[in-house]
Image (tube, rainbow, N blue to C red):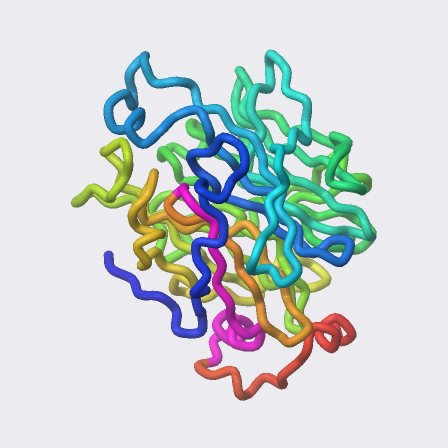
Amino acid sequence: MKLTQCSVIKKSSHNPLIKSSMIPFTSTLTYNAGITRYQDNYVMLFRNDYNYTKEDMLYRWGTSAFPQTKINLGLAVSDDGIKWRIKPEPVLPIPLTEEMFSVYDPRLTVIEGRCYLCFAADTRHGICGGIAVTDDLEKFELLSLSVPDNRNMVLFPEKINGMFVRLERPFPIYGRGVPEAFDIWISDSPDCKYWGNSRLLLGSEKVPFCNCKIGPAAPPVKTHAGWLTTFHAVWKHTDKELLSWHGGWNKEYFGGLMLLDLHDPSKIIGMYDKPLLVPEENYEIDGMRGSVIFPGGMILEDSGEVKIYYGAADTVECLATADVNDLIALCIGNKKSTGLKSMTRAKVLQEA
């Protein structure tokens, strides 16, 4: 299967925005970041893998000699969302324990002036999804931790009908009967601690460019037409191997796009039936695991520009941009966005 990049998307000439050579502490890979605007800055928490090299992967992957992956999070701030100032020390938002030994793949959402962090956590009994909150990006309060196996959690940036709402991706092996046929679910909570009312949002079989799994990507943004929502979708190749540091890699990750109802986000208004983001650039194809695009942050600017931040090749952090009306048009089936009135971000939020 060969897919081409959506024409409304422009990948930044500054890519990669963040890479390991820029990091002031030990780093091999920097990717899958959460990005938001908070306290007059663009803020990024990025995943940082640091205790192995490309040579380790090439010669020791899958052997007892390969070290257990070590991960921390880096913090960066920016005035424009393009050029980033990286803090000199890594961040440890959640204290690690003998049971929970790794926190990674952060997602950031500001709700009522507080910055919420969704993350994945490796535990000795499975992968959990967690939520924490901070007011200063230094001290974090852990609010909830799911049972295994769940991850890719993202929060909506406001309460809906008085409830916190999240998207998530449980990954049952036995229940679905097919390995990695994972789907997107939606849940809500009165306090961001106790979650329930869980229901299926989108099944992986409904995505034409997926034959494997899907999952939430960046936290949704609010528009006049609905919640603009990215997801990742995976095509597992059976006829070829993709570039990677360790060999045997055959999964291609795409960025997808859908639009959810403003008042009931469990209803999908529309979904673009092709990938929004396709791995085509060298920094997306050649890396630790090549041909991977993994969105983790989306910001709607006052101008109507949407910034979509994504990890590329499980190696670096990148940026793509598009006009909000073009993205909405993709979801509702319009061939052109001229039929939609142009709106600034302020007007979008006013009419929502």
* 201 with respect to 52 (left or right): right
**Relative depth, front residue between 291 and 60:** 60
**Relative depth, front residue between 228 and 268:** 228
* Residue 102 drawn above or below residue 278: above
Residue at horizontal 58%, vertical 53%? 84
Magenta residue span: 314-334
Residue at horizontal 56%, vertical 30%? 72
Residue 28, can we see it? yes
Is residue 21 within the magenta segment?
no
Q: Quadrant of residue 24?
A: top right
> Where's the N terminus, which quadrant?
bottom left
Residue 58 location (% of width, % of height): 25, 28
Residue 274 location (% of width, % of height): 38, 64
Residue 229 location (% of width, % of height): 57, 59
Residue at horizontal 55%, vertical 87%? 339
Residue 309 location (% of width, % of height): 52, 55
Is residue 316 within the magenta segment?
yes
Q: Quadrant of residue 89?
A: top right
Residue at horizontal 44%, vertical 58%? 15
* 302 with respect to 319 (left or right): right
* Residue 286 drawn above or below residue 330: above
